[in-house]
Image: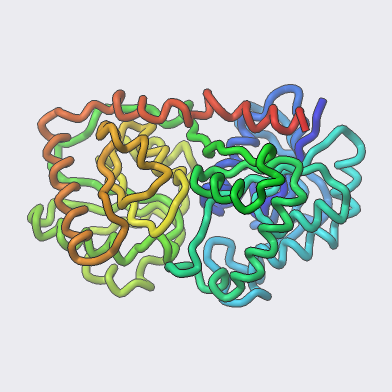
Amino acid sequence: MHRIISIHPFDPRGCKVGGIETHVRHTIKFFPEDIDLVVVGVDESNLLDLGVPIILLNEFGREYTFIPILNTEIININTAAKNILKSLTFNFFISLFKYRKEIKKHYFSMKSSVEIQRYEFSWFCFFNRFTNLLITHGDADPNKKLDSLLAKVWFLHKLNESFAVKHANKVVSVSSEQTKRLIEDFPKRADDIHYKTVSVDDSLFKPTPFNIDESILRIAFAGRLDEFKRPQMMFKILKVLRTNLNGKVEFHYIGVTDPSVFKEYHDVKDIVICHGFKRSPDIAEMWKDYHIGIVTSVFEGWPVYVMEAICAGRPVISLKLDQMQDTFNSGMCGQMLHINDDNESAINEMSNSFINHWDLIKNGSVEPTIISSTINPFKVSTQLKYFFSLHTNL
């Protein structure tokens, strides 16, 4: 038996969204019989005793241990902090040391390894002599749009990255471009740096026929409306589409960000439907009624919501993103532009692509099962066991 201690500032019972959270939820759902799982996280209910383990059940009725070390009364878990004292990562980092005795007890009572998704937590592993697997979720560019706090502490981000990569037992990047960069920056660790995307749960997301009865194009996006995802551009595209499609378009937003903070939203709010936080089974059902996904990000690895859309047999229209480019080159899972910009030309080009794909969907030229097959290598049924084997072989 091998114990994995997954350290990440979220509540497995809660509503924090993002690619990392999806990966940890997949770990909880699919951990095998020879793994004992401990999740160190936060308590969104603010009712649990911090540092006191509780037993939870996954979807298959298997037990795992949850150790809450921080409540969420003073922080917002779904928005970027404006100063470090209100940062979820910073507060969680402090709490790791505060409750280190309980975490160490679980680590040293069985053959164990720790999984971290944030560079900062490598210091905690180092000081406690923990074997650890670092999973890093993509590169940011300080010269482009970033959430405000990361832009302000970029030097600290790079310091933490260097320390984490040098001291991790294994490093997995979900970004092919970041993997290349890390190998170039840390050549002595090249043999221990690997590329593997996060997974999409193909037990939930399955291709289904399009529903075109109402002749309304339904575009969907799931996740946080972070600055680097360019939500303003999404709303500008919607404005163009509403004109060109005579109002027969809807934008379905699944997430907890308030879109009204963007002035562009107010021009199209009558065609935006906000669904709030939804769990994966709900999102899988919702994709049955949607037609196309959208990606306007400055940078990305392989966003989980894009994998989920394609796995559900829905095409995606995206700006140019290197990591996804090879999959999109076939033209079977949507269209990727040859540029990554938010100027008027890019907005019009994306709008035209939506209209062209909508026409193809309506005339029956788009086959959901073919779309879904394009990401077979990324499906949970194919690759999640890779992460578990890395732990047991450390």
Residue 255: where, in percent of width, then height? 44, 55
Q: How is the image coloured?
A: rainbow
Q: Is residue 373 above or below residue 167?
A: above
Q: Report the front residue among 346 and 280.
A: 346
Left or right of 263, for residue 98 = right
- Residue at 19% of width from left, 46% of height from top? 217
- Residue at 7% of width from left, 55% of height from top? 246
The answer, for residue 112, to whether it is visible in the render is yes
Q: Could you say which quadrant of the image residue 385 lies in?
A: top right
Q: Is residue 229 above or below residue 86?
A: above
Left or right of 249, for residue 51 = right
Residue 210: where, in percent of width, then height? 23, 32
- Residue at 69% of width from left, 64% of height from top? 159
Q: Report the front residue among 375 and 19.
A: 375
The answer, for residue 47, to whether it is visible in the render is no
- Residue at 17% of width from left, 35% of height from top? 361
Q: Could you tell me which quadrant the N terminus lies in?
A: top right
Q: Is residue 376 above or below residue 227?
A: above
Left or right of 136, for residue 32 = right
Q: Could you say which quadrant of the image residue 299 lies in?
A: bottom left
Residue 281: where, in percent of width, then height? 46, 36
Q: Could you tell me which quadrant the C terminus lies in?
A: top right
Q: Report the front residue among 321 and 96.
A: 321
Q: Report the front residue among 294 and 49.
A: 294
Left or right of 312, for residue 239 = left
Residue 174: where, in percent of width, then height? 54, 43
Number of marks in the image? 0
